[in-house]
Image: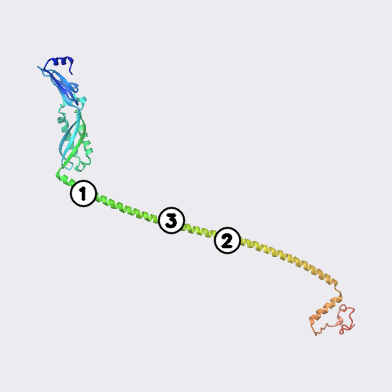
Amino acid sequence: MRTPLLALVCALASGCAYQTVQPGHLGLRYDPAVGLRRDVVPEGKHSLGWCFLRDCGRIVDFDVTFSTKQEVLKTTSQEGLALDLQLSVIFKPIISELYELDSEVGPNYYDEVVGPEFRSAASGVFAHHPYSELAANKEKIEDEIEKDVQRRIKGKHIAIASITLESIQYAPEIQTATRQRLVAEQESVRQKAAIEQDAARQKTQMENDALKQKLALEQETAQKQSEITSKTSEQELTMKLELAKKKNERAIAEEDALLEKAKAAATVAKAHAEAEAITILAKAHAEENRASTQALSPLTVQMKAYEALGQLGGTGTTIMLGDFSKVPQFLFPPGLGGGMYPLFGKK
């Protein structure tokens, strides 16, 4: 640091020396009398003092921005195939450890520490990977290299920001084999796509056929169900009609039975009435006969008897009645004489 007195002396004397710290840089003041100072010198122009008859020392400059270094590395893959690689590493010094970095490693810390460890770590990582995985696992390989470099430079006062794999150059035979493999892979992909397309087409066709069969089966099932339903409905209707018919027949039979019963009742009533009428008529005839019987005289009875006998014998018939002496006298009324009945004698 410049003091006002030192600045005044430097302004009066022509032997005063200066050193500028550029933006993005920091410095450490080295004084031959006291050695390297720990105080960090910021960017700007700094006076080193009057250096006419003595060594004024210097400011050790450090670029504290991120720096990028590229490395071309020749190494081998896991199979032992030669690889030409181009890698980049981004790094910077740890600002709080600039004094230790300068006193232990020095300003040329990349060539002393970072570069060798970076190349060694990269060679070790690539030796554990087959060449076929390098392009596909690029980010993973970069992370492995970065992790290994950080492990190697731990305590060296340097920070590693990232490591990138810029390019890979394979050996000619690898390039030929890779091209052939890529062509084979592309052909395999094409064939696989064609097979998958054909399989998809067949699957679609099978699905369509299955769908058609399903629809046909559903349609046939629906038709059969409709037929069964229709037949069932028809049977139910027939049964209902038969049942209604039987009900009607039963009702008619019941009506007929009631009618016959009514007819029978009427017949019975008529017969009963006729019987009663006959009974009454018989009684009347009996009464009439009885009355008639009571009204007949002996002569009337005798005349009726002769009329009956005459009808019994017919015309020109002679009837012998036997011994007329034995004939009861009541058959010959007193008024009848021998002249009327010449065949009869008197006693």
Picture residue at 61% right of the left edge, 61% below the top:
252
Image location (x, y in percent) of residue 85? 16, 38
Q: Is residue 16 left or right of residue 286?
A: left
The amino acid beneath tag 1 is Ala
In which image quadrant can residue 330 be found?
Answer: bottom right
Q: Give me the disc on residue 246.
A: 2
Badge 3 or badge 2: first in the primary sequence: 3
Q: Residues within 10 Å of mark 3 (few under 14, many from 20)?
A: few
For the residues carrying marks 3 and 1, which lies nearer the camera in this image?
3
Q: Is residue 230 left or right of residue 291?
A: left
Badge 3 or badge 1: first in the primary sequence: 1
Q: Residue 158: tell me if it is visible.
A: no
| Element on which disc 2 rests | helix
Marks 1 and 2, how far apart at CA: 89 Å
Picture residue at 54% right of the left edge, 60% below the top:
241
User: Is 105 in front, or is 7?
Assistant: 7
Q: Above or below — where is 93 with respect to 8? A: below
Residue tagged by mark 1? 184
Name, please, the residue furthest toward the left. Answer: 53
Picture residue at 65% right of the left edge, 62% below the top:
259
Whether pointer 3 and pointer 2 mark residues with C-beta atoms closer than 8 Å, the reply is no
Image location (x, y in percent) of residue 10? 14, 16
In which image quadrant can residue 128 be found?
Answer: top left
Q: Give me the disc on residue 334.
A: none
| Element on which disc 1 rests | helix
Please identify the quadrant where the C terminus is shown.
Answer: bottom right
In which image quadrant can residue 255 be found?
Answer: bottom right
The amino acid beneath tag 3 is Ala
Q: Give me the disc on residue 222.
A: 3
Badge 1 or badge 2: first in the primary sequence: 1
Picture residue at 19% right of the left edge, 37% below the top:
165
